[in-house]
Amino acid sequence: MIDAGKKAGSEEEEFKMEVKLLSQDKAKVKVVVKGSTAAELNAYRRTIVNKVLAMAIDTVEIVQNSSALYDEMLAHRLGLVVLKTDAESYFARAECKCKGVGCARCTLDLTLDVQGPGIVYAEQIKSKDPAVVPVYGKTPIAKLLEGQHIKLTAQAILAPGKEHIKFSPGLMYYQGFPQIKIGAGVKNADAIAEICPTGVFESKDKKLKVKNTEACVLCMACVDASKGEVEVKGSDTDFIVTIEPWGQLSPIQMVEGLVDALHKDLDALGEEIKKIK
């Protein structure tokens, strides 16, 4: 439970945001957020995509490339390799003491040296920092024939997704919490339960019942099948929120990065307001 106070004029209003975990696995986390708005959640979504820091390969110096790929295409593929991010050990270049020149505090060196024949995989990229390595080692980079050779050095940096989508750590998306009403005139309970793609309903003794509200994705297939006897809509204040990382950061780290980014934006806004005064 998150409580916060809010002043409106001379009166103090209190609002509460309640968060409940729905499901969690390696791929994503789902939570129910109560007492929020679509505008607020959209601000969080945009911040995660655009401002949370993650690491990715930014520059590549190719020593030798006799593969079928142009140098630019090879560099592009390397840039999209998902790197495990140690955000606490590195600084964004804009905040580093080197002022963007590049140093061990803001830049990580990687190398790739592979001869054919065979497939070049992301796991063959050698990193100077064992904490920052490709998340998906079997990501194919290139195919080499007999006698072909790729040798290069690369630099990875910490940056936000607004600079390039390769730095974005994942997605956050949401929907209104399902509000389902079943009318008394439902006759085809079995058909409605079967047509629901996520198993929201069950039919017992020809009666339709909701067995898993959180599974509803608001597709409205049940509404069409029931000819209006089933009503479904999304709440304006309660939401199902999904955080889906690509692998650079965990969902918890993404939320922590979201909070840090929001604090920086609010501090910057406060400074601008002081200048106006």
Image (cartoon, helix red, strand yellow):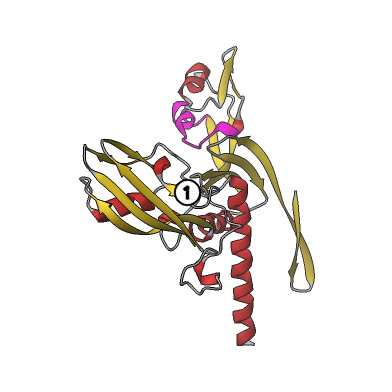
Drawn side of residue 7 relative to residue 227, left or right: right
182 or 252: nearer the viewer: 252
In terms of secondary structure, where does tag 1 sit?
loop
User: 39 above or below 220?
Assistant: below
User: 242 above or below 105?
Assistant: above
- Tell me the residue at 22%/37% (across/down): 145
Drawn side of residue 73 relative to residue 212, left or right: left
- Tell me the residue at 52%/63% (across/down): 104
* Residue identified by numbered label 1: 83
Residue 166 located within the stretch drawn in magenta: no
- Residue 193, percent from left and from top: 51, 21
User: 86 above or below 271?
Assistant: above
Looking at the image, can residue 238 be seen?
no
What is the span of residues highlighted in magenta in the rendered image? 214-229
Residue 221 located within the stretch drawn in magenta: yes
- Residue 190, percent from left and from top: 51, 16
What amino acid is labelled 1 in the image? Answer: Leu
